[in-house]
Image: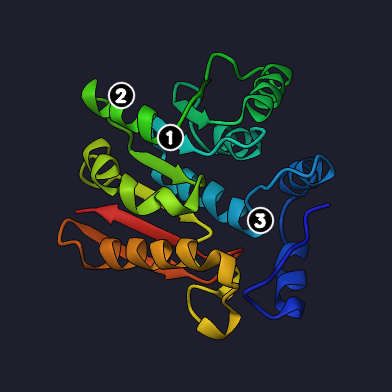
Amino acid sequence: MIEEQYINFEFILRYIRSLVTEDVKQLYDFAMDKDIPVAKPETTKLLYLLAMIKQPKRVLELGTGIGCSAVILSKAISEDATIVTVEKNPENYEEACKLFRENGLTNRIFPKNGDGMEVLQELTQQGEAFDFIFLDSAKGQYYDYIPYLKKLLPRGGILVTDNVLYKGMVANDDLLILRKKTIVKRLRMYLDAISHDPELESVVIPIGDGISLTVKK
């Protein structure tokens, strides 16, 4: 079972999770039982709320996992909206496809099995646009994704990025694990870049493992 590490006091986390709806909890437990990393329940609930407010017509997710976040997102948006979700791991991809079929979502969620950077390059070359992007993939690549994410987002588009505080290590060197040094360095580069880019407006929220919320001006 995946061991969780927290960026908030555990009593606050327990209380916040007690307020999360049962459908989110069930999908989170489903992923944990399979030992698959997935967005924390409180993060997923915030993602759901943001999508409900924005009501995007096209959603892009990088890091499908086994499909839990995409299923939740599909419940927040209109039935004519679509989700493209990208997963590199073939086994996780197959699990996600199965989950989408079981939930009757194959006409709304379109999974891609491939490398995130390669898919971003392909989508950019095709002139695609997504008004809501959820980034939850290889954390060491977030910084390299920025030029493509900016091209794919229209004005007013929302980018939600998970794990940006990475168990607190991004904010505090005292917590740093040596073998995670490169990931932490690149996450700091990512946050600095999106926070000071004149085309973007960003904020970091200490929920789950830390998320950043970015809007293209």
Specify the amino acid type for callout 2.
Glu
Can residue 91 be spotted in the picture? Answer: yes
Q: Quadrant of residue 117?
A: top left
CA separation in Å, label 3 and label 1? 21 Å
**Numbered tag placed on residue 40 in the rendering:** 3
**Residue 184 appears at what percent x and percent y?**
47, 67
**Mark 3: which secondary structure?**
loop
**Residue 191 appears at what percent x and percent y?**
35, 65
Q: Which residue is mark 2?
A: 122
Q: Quadrant of residue 19?
A: bottom right
Name the mark nearer the viewer: 2 or 3.
2
The relative height of residue 17 versus residue 45 in the rendered view (above or below) is below
Q: Are marks 2 and 1 in contact (CB under 8 Å)?
A: no
Q: Residue furthest top?
A: 107
Name the mark nearer the viewer: 3 or 1.
1
Q: Which residue is mark 1?
A: 116
**Residue 146 appears at what percent x and percent y?**
29, 48
N-term mark: 2 or 1: 1
Q: Residue furthest front?
A: 179
**Numbered tag placed on residue 43 in the rendering:** none
Can residue 57 be spotted in the picture? Answer: no
Q: Are marks 2 and 3 in contact (CB under 8 Å)?
A: no
The relative height of residue 169 versus residue 67 in the rendered view (above or below) is below
CA separation in Å, label 2 and label 3? 29 Å
**Mark 1: which secondary structure?**
helix
**Mark 2: which secondary structure?**
helix
Residue occupying image coordinates x 66% and y 47%: 38
Specify the amino acid type for callout 3.
Lys
Specify the amino acid type for callout 1.
Gly
**Residue 136 appears at what percent x and percent y?**
51, 47
